[in-house]
Image (tube, rainbow, N blue to C red):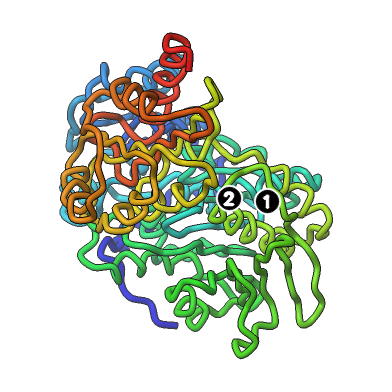
Amino acid sequence: MPDKTSVFPVPPSYICPPFSSCRDIAGLRVTVMGLGLHGGGAASARFFAECGADVTVTDKKSEQELRPSVEALADLPRLHFVLGTHREEDFRNADLVIKNPGVKFAGNPYLALAPSVETDISVFLRLSPAKIVAVTGSKGKSSTVSAIHFGLQKAGVRSFLGGNITVSPLTFLRETGADSVAVLELSSWQLADLRGRGILHPVCAVITPVMPDHQNWYKTMEDYVADKKVIYSGMTADGTLICNFDDEWGKQFAAETSAGVIWYSAAPFPQQAGIRRGAWLEPGGGFFTDNGAVCRILPAETAVPGSHMKTNLLAAGAALTVLGIAPEKTACALGAFPGIPHRLEFLCESGGIKWYNDSAATIPEAAAGAVRAFREPVVLICGGTDKNLDFAPLAGAAKKAKAVILFAGSGTEKLRALLAQENVPYAGPYTGISQAVEAAGQAADAGDAVVFSPGAASFEYFQNEFDRGSRFKNAVHAYCRTAGK
């Protein structure tokens, strides 16, 4: 199978974990590189400390910046912090370094001193006996993993959800068994860290649509996709890879994998395609065929809005079917799936105006999809930090919005030029989230939907997209209380 080398390869000398079970961890000197605020660093520190390791947590951010994570670990006596800097001795003298996925191997002088480097994902895969369902892609992966997990739980399966969705699998590792399923969302960075380790063997993997992302990290789109391919590099004919029929990358993945392939599509498959196993959408819902036998796995009406969300649910339904969940249970569960925070999340209705938080839309295509998700007029709040992406899809979709409110950022400057070319008026850009909310509220009338779907990253004004979404929610509730909308 073709396997382009990652631009972030894992040096072979790092792949020598000093443990093969949780019992081996007691007494190890473990350095956690990157505490962060997403929970992954804190979960790694807690896991190793509770297993009896002597843990050093180091991060270049200050204690004040990391206070929530530091306070969450205050009860652990076998742990100490080195914050505001990295020290060479904390890497050279460690038995094991746990790396944050946002840290590159290439050219890192501290990792070069480490005898062994793992991540929370690799530790989980080495130690957990659970069956693995893995999901990657550029758009829709968080909703897809969450829907799979929701459906498994509704069917009575012992399921756990973690990965890039901001829940470290180390938080539930010791609860997993051979009878359980771990549903993991895996980013390109997390997959790059697994290359060459030989430990990712999903029973089922899903690749949602792949679009340009993280092009400020990767030299080319092909480099980015090469890391996505790690999700199926360890799969065999016993596993199932679910590919998007509407995405040209999906066809490449299907041609390369050793796993069995199931397709999913937003429309019925053309007869000439000869698809024997797959899922598709039509007005009556979502359907699945297995060599001619057809069943419904998604109802016509779902609790979450938007055609792209239905496509995510369809992918989840295909995975649930592969995992042996009965079609009627799958359709019932996915029809009731309530969605997840920061992804077309309904906040409130005030004065006839509905407010939605889609802060997790960090690429232009995702924000464009959010505009198309609504039948009612949309007042769109968008903009943010650039990741070297093309904002043309968002500018094109903005023409359909009733009004466009811009939040400031490097990406917004690129978007403004495109909006001017398309003769799309806008308000802003605003540097304060409350200002943007107020402008949107003034532009909206009863019957409209105000949708915060940035289509960009968040680093210039927020810690991350979740911090951005939480601040938006607070600003909306405050505005609606005072403005009577």
Residue where numbered disc 1 is placed: 181
SS state under label 1: strand
Q: Nearer the viewer, residue 282 or 229?
A: 282
Residue 76 image offset from top left, x and y in percent: 46, 19
In space, the residues marked 2 and 1 are separated at their CA atoms by 12 Å
Q: Earlier in the sequence, mark 2 or mark 1?
A: 2
What crowding class fits label 1: few (fewer than 14 Cα within 10 Å), some (14-19), or many (20 or more)?
A: many
- Residue 371 left/right relative to 144: left
Residue type pointed to by label 1? Val
Q: Is residue 253 above or below residue 437?
A: below
Residue 91 lies, with reference to residue 67, above or below; the image says: below
Residue 399 or residue 270, whichever sits in front: 399
Residue visible at 55% across and 80% down?
Answer: 258
Total label count? 2
> Closer to the observer: label 2 or label 1?
2
Q: Is residue 130 above or below residue 470?
A: below
Where disc 2 sits, the SS reads helix
Instruction: Decide if residue 411 is on the left or right side of residue 133.
Output: left
The residue sitting at the bottom extreme is: 272
Q: Name the residue at 43% across, 21% down.
A: 476
Q: Please tell me in which quadrant of the rendered image residue 442 appears.
A: top left
Q: Give how far across and how far down residue 290 sits, in percent.
A: 76, 77
- 151 left or right, relative to 118: right
Q: Is residue 136 left or right of residue 31?
A: right
Instruction: Kindly identify which residue carries mark 2.
Output: 145
Q: Quadrant of the N terminus?
A: bottom left
Outermost residue, top side: 482
Of residues 205 and 478, which is closer to you in this image? Answer: 478
Seen at 56% across and 71% down, the residue is 235
Spot occupied by residue 163 in the image (x, y as percentages of width and height): 49, 45
Asked whether the beta carbons under mark 2 and mark 1 sit within 8 Å of each other, the answer is no
Residue type marked 2? Val
